[in-house]
Structures are given as structure tokens and as C-alpha cells.
Image: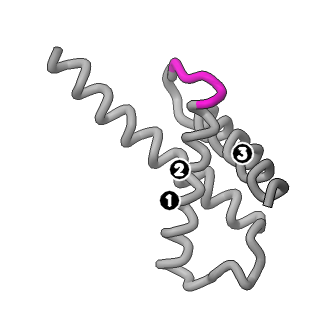
Amino acid sequence: MLWFIISFIVLGLLAGAVARLLVPGRDPMGIPATIGLGIVGSFIGGFLGYILFGHDLSEGAFQPSGFIGSVLGAIAALLIYRAVAGRRLVRH
């Protein structure tokens, strides 16, 4: 169980960092926020992958396609975060 949590955090950090590198613009996020972004992206990518392709954990929890889905999900989460944060800043 501990190995799963550690690998989830490391993969979240990697997916969040790649997403932040691929999306242009400045994001004042620290390492914990980047990990959170990657973990949220993993959930989004995993959910969309399951909906679109019907794969589940019996086929392996860690796959290259899962990492790609995590990065794509993190990009989507980052863009949504920017849209929401941008509106909030404009209103004040």
C-alpha cells in the first residue's frame, strides 16, 4: 500500500510537471500544487480512458497510455483552473 501511494505521488509530480511545461504561460505553483495537478489529471485521464476505451485495473494500473492520459487530464485541469482563477481575479 505504501508503494502505491509513493508511486502515485511521483507519477502525479511527473504528470503535473509535464503538463505545466506543455501549457504556455506562468503558473505560480509549488511542488505540492504540481503533485495535486498531476493526481487530478490522473483521475480525469483515467475516467476518460475508461469511458472511451472500457479498460480497467485488471489490465495493469501503470501503463504508458495511462501516463499520457494523466498528462492530458492534467492539461485539461490546468486550463480549467486558469479559466476559473482568471474570472475570480477579474471580478475583484
Tag 1's secondary structure?
Answer: helix
- Which dot, 1 or 3, sits closer to the camera? 3
Q: Which residue is rendered at x = 77% and y = 66% of the image?
A: 62
- Residue 31 placement (x, y as % from top left): 66, 27
- Residue 59 placement (x, y as % from top left): 75, 83
Q: Amino acid at mark 1?
A: Ile
Tell which of 8 and 18 is nearer to you. 8
Pointer 1 and pointer 2: residues touching (CB < 8 Å)?
Answer: yes
Residue farthest to the front, as pictured: 1
Residue farthest to the right, as pictured: 3
- Residue 65, image quadrant: bottom right
Residue farthest to the top, as pictured: 92
Instruction: Tell me if residue 77 comes above or below residue 25 in the rendering.
Output: below
- Residue 29, image quadrant: top right
- Residue 61 placement (x, y as % from top left): 74, 71
Image mark count: 3
Instruction: Tell me if residue 19 comes above or below residue 68 in the rendering.
Output: above
| Number of other residues with Cα within 10 Å of mark 1, as a class: few under 14, some 14 to 19, many 20 or more | many
Disc marking residue 9: 3
| Number of other residues with Cα within 10 Å of mark 3, as a class: few under 14, some 14 to 19, many 20 or more | some
Q: Which residue is mark 2?
A: 40
Tag 3's secondary structure?
Answer: helix
Counting residues from the start of the chain, the first of labels 3 and 2 encountered is 3
Q: Is residue 81 magenta?
A: no
Counting residues from the start of the chain, the first of labels 1 and 3 encountered is 3
Q: Which residue is mark 1?
A: 44
Q: Is 83 left or right of 14, judged from the image as shown?
A: left
Which region of the structure is painted magenta? Answer: 28-32
